[in-house]
Every structure is written in C-alpha cells, then in structure tokens.
Amino acid sequence: MFELDTSYTVLLVVCLIAACGFEFVNGFHDTANAVATVIYTNSLKPWMAVVWSGIMNATGVFFGGIAVAMGIVNLLPVETLVDQNIAHSVSMVAALLLSAIFWNLLTWWFGIPCSSSHTLVASILGVGLAYSFLPESHGDSAVNWAKALDIGSSLLISPLFGFTMVIILMFLLQRLTKNTPTGDDLFKEPKKNTPPPFWIRSILLLTCTLVSFFHGNNDGQKGVGLIMLILIGIVPGYFALNESFDIRGLDRPLAQIETIIRDADTTRLSAPDVKKITDSKGMIAELSTWSKKYTFVKDMPRTERFQIRKDLLTLNRNLKSLIGSEELNLSPSDKTTIEKDLKALEKTTDYAPLGVIALISVSLGLGTMIGWKRIVKTIGEKIGKQHLTYAQGASSELVAASTIGLSSYLGLPVSTTHVLSSGIAGSMVASKGIKNLQPETVRNILIAWLLTLPVVMVVSGSLFLLFRAIF
C-alpha cells in the first residue's frame, strides 16, 4: 500500500527476526515433548534425539498446509486494527511478540511445560480486546469470537483427550500382554545406559518421529500465521492478497452469491442484518469490477489490495452470519452453494509464501536442537513417581501424535505440550493410580496453564495500548 522508509524497514526486519525468535523459543521449549521418552528409555542418545527431532520438526512445517496458520490470522482480523499509520501496525506486532516470547522464556527457565499455542492465542486475544479501549474502535474488540471459540475448545479438550486415551491404551496393553514376555518387556523400567529390545526401540523411535513431525505440522503453522500477521499489518500492499492468484476465478462464485442473496426473502431480517445484505451487495459489485479488470492479483494496484482484502473478509463474515440465521429464508442447497463459493473466495486471502514457510521451518528446527534439558527432566522424572517405562513412553507419544495430526487436518491449533504432559500423567495413573503423580510438579504445571491466558492477555493488551499511546 505504501513504500517503507528506512526506519520502518528496520522495524519490519526486527519484527520478522522476533517472530523467528518466537518460533525458535517454541522449538526448544517443546523439544522435550518429542525426545523425553526416547532419552529416558535409552532408545537414543540425547544429541541424536534432538537433532532427529529438529529435522522432523522442520520437515513437518512444509507438509502442514496453512489451515492452522489462517486460523491464527483470522483470530485477529488485522484489517480492523491497522490503517495508514504504520506505527499502529508495529504496535500490534510488537505487543504480540514481546508478550509471547516473555512467557515462553519465563516458563522454560523454571522448567515448566507450557503451551506456546496457548501463549500465542492469549497474546492475540489481549491485543484484540485492548483495541476496544481506543476511540476509533467505537467500543468493539477486534477478535473473531467464533474462531476464538473453536481454538479455545481445541486447546481445552486436547489435554483431556490425551489423558483419557493414554489410560485406555495402557489398560488395553496391560490386558493384551498380561503374563507374556512382551508384557514383561513393555512394562519394566529401562536399565541404566542399556537400550531396550530392538522392537521396543523401533516403536519408540517411530513415536518420537511422529510427534516431532506433527509438532512441526501444527506449531510451525502458528509461526507462519504470526509472520503473515506481521507482513499484512506492516506491508499490506505486498501481502494482503495472494499475488499469484488468477482473480478471474472470482467471477463465478461472486455471480452465484449475488444471485442467491438478490432473490432471498429478507422481510424477516433485523435492521443490522438488512445492512449486512446491502453492504454485501455493494462489496460483490466492487469485487466483480476488479475481477473483470485484471487477470492476476499482481497486476492490481498495490494501493487497492488491502481494501479488497477487507471487502473479501467482511463479505465472508457477513454471509456466514446471515446463512446461520433462521430469519433469512434460504434453501439448504443455496446455503451449501454460498459456503462453497466463500471457500473459493478465501483462496485470494488465505495463503503463505514459500519463503515464509521456509523461514519458520529453519527457526523451529534449529530451536528444537537447543535448550531441551530443563523440560525433558520435568517430563521424564517429575510428573510421575516412577521412572518412565517403555509402554508409558510409547503410549503417550502415540496418542500425542494422533491428536496433533488430527487437529492439523481439521485446521485447529493444539498444544503439543498439553497433550503429551497430560498423556504422561495419564500413563502414570494407569500404572499405579493417582498416587503415582508428583503433586508439586502437577500443581506447578496446572498453575502455569491457568495463568497463561490471563497473564499474557494483560501483558499483550497493556503493551499494545502503551505502544499506541507512544506512537
């Protein structure tokens, strides 16, 4: 939308480095989730485990798609927060990054497994809510609450799911292998400096690989989403829309949506919904003009791209709200058509350049190879009172990998830390009951989990308001 002068170019570079720093911290904060079991069962030497985990994390980023990344971007509608004043965009970005990195480093220093996902979401919510205190907000917060509810549900349910499923899996393993040599091998504690039998070692290496890959798959996308927030906020003329998209592809879905809402019965709609219909018709007409005028997004004036992004996202939100309303009389087939057409329109705004994905892949992969000892020790030694057995390690990681992989497929961010820590706790309970947990460690983890949302929201929101006042 505008060319950056030297000072803002430096700020952009600093923000991008800080985003890579967040993902780097995410890597060494979460390394323990993948390598604790293989290290504490003597399946791999520590240096081999972290290097392999780093490689698989980096690989996972490239195969994760962008569904989770766009969930992060859409949680904070950046088009609401930013304007022609680049300093306002920098205020948003700086508040997000500083608060998220601060909490990740603080919990890592104390060796407490804490979710980077939870932290990032909290920082985004804090900025969005803080925006409601500014005069230009008219009292509205810049938070997509529907998306926030989806993400919140995912972050809440996943650790409960991990805890429960590991208990079930451990119970099945105990029943199926009872009084067999296999059961004796699986449920015994590892001998010091002695690798497990080959078949057990192979299973543990596989689960370590899967957790690492799916961690990159899911958490890497959060870093991609964070960088896209930065780029869209600070240089929207270059990143508001997917430059390689053939804009003529908008013609058909726009025409179909226009026909459906033009013929829809709006007599029962409230005044705000009628306004949404009117605004949507105007945006469709404007977007149709652009789609007929240019072939690719890269041919469009940079000064117009951010407004087109705003129109596309506002149209999407308006129509999703309307088709979910019983007052708008639409047939099921019309609703399905609109939903399908909106998906087609999202291809213009929902994207991530390969360079961004590569940057996050390297940052996460390198971070995974560093700083693993503090939290590995907590997961391997301090959650339960007994040493981690082969069955406990394999069960916890298998459930974690499955949960994270499914969440990535559904486009939902999930906490690897929460799922695996809960899984380890579940495996300890499955072995010897609730008394097998170490109360102090469990208490510290729960306190960190409970404090993450309010503390990070307050910090990020306060920083955002402070930076906006300064700039």
Image: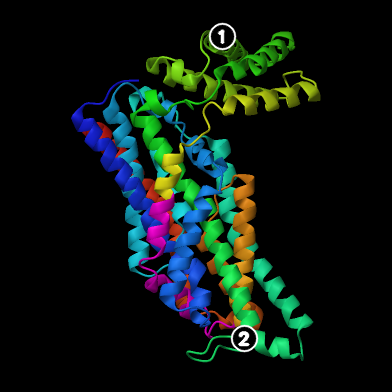
The picture places residue 189, in percent across and down from the top left corner, at 57, 88
Name the side, left or right, on which 180 lies relative to 44: right
Instruction: Identify the residue position indicated by label 1 in the image.
Output: 292
Magenta segment boundaries in residue numbering: 361-389
Classify residue 332 by image quadrant. Answer: top right
Which residue is at a point 24% across and 37% down the rendered structure image?
11
Q: Residues within 10 Å of mark 1 (few under 14, many from 20)?
A: few
CA gap between label 1 and label 2 equals 66 Å
**SS of the residue under disc 2:** loop
Instruction: Identify the residue position indicated by label 2 in the image.
Output: 197
Q: Which image quadrant: the C terminus? A: top left
Name the side, left or right, on which 175 lies relative to 109: right
Name the side, left or right, on which 413 lies relative to 50: right
Q: Where 202 sits versus 193, above or below?
A: above
Determine contact: label 1, label 2, CB under 8 Å: no
Classify residue 54 by image quadrant. Answer: bottom left
The answer to if 367 sits in the magenta stretch is: yes
Total count of labels? 2
Q: Residues within 10 Å of mark 2 (few under 14, many from 20)?
A: few
**Mark 1 or mark 2: whose residue is earlier in sequence:** 2
**SS of the residue under disc 1:** helix
What is the basis of the colouring in this image? rainbow
The kind of residue tagged 2 is Pro
